[in-house]
Image: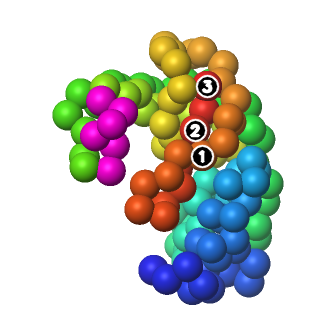
Amino acid sequence: MSDDELVDGDLTYASWKRALRDGDLLGQKCRDCRHATAAPKAACAHCGSRELETVELPTTGAIYSETTITVPPRQFSDDDPYQVAIVELDEARVMAHIDGAVEIGDTVRLQGSIEADDAPAPLFG
């Protein structure tokens, strides 16, 4: 998907990346079933509706699942090993890199983003 490709009326991948780099986490909420997601999508993953609205997601959540990557892809070879997690926010879950050691249930806060090939990923700690 190109950076400027329209995902819905408001949220493009480019605007999602800009917001993340500015310390904000944007997502979408389905106007039909109210399911929320932490990244731009063309349709609701729950009901398939294309009626999505852009929402600002909380920057604090809890560790839902985590793992340590010991054989990293090329983009993260300097960070060997590193931890990633699924962070449960109030309405959505987001895959994120983790700054520091965490366990399931720990509270974490968005610290910014980590870059790989011009694709930022949320960084929580």
| Nearer to us in this view, 87 or 100 | 100
Q: Earlier in the sequence, mark 1 or mark 3?
A: 1
As drawn, the label of residue 14 is none
Q: Which residue is mark 1?
A: 113
Residue 70 percent across, percent down from the top left? 24, 27
Q: Secondary structure at mark 1?
A: strand
- Residue depicted at x 67% and y 54%: 20
Name the kind of residue labelled 3 in the image.
Answer: Gly
Name the kind of residue labelled 1 in the image.
Answer: Ser
Decide: is 39 above or below 100.
Answer: below
| Nearer to us in this view, 75 or 51 | 75
Verify whether residue 77 appears in magenta.
yes
Report the Cα–Cα distance between label 1 and label 3.
11 Å
Q: Which residue is mark 3?
A: 125
Other residues around mark 3 within 10 Å, as few (<14) / some (14–19) / many (≥20) = some
- Residue depicted at x 25% and y 46%: 73
Principal secondary structure, stretch drawn in magenta: helix
Other residues around mark 1 within 10 Å, as few (<14) / some (14–19) / many (≥20) = many
Q: Secondary structure at mark 3?
A: loop
Residue 87 percent across, percent down from the top left? 56, 34
Q: Which residue is mark 2?
A: 123
Do residues under tags 2 and 1 come within 8 Å of each other at their CB atoms?
yes
- Residue depicted at x 57% and y 86%: 5
Give the residues drawn in magenta, as a range: 75-80
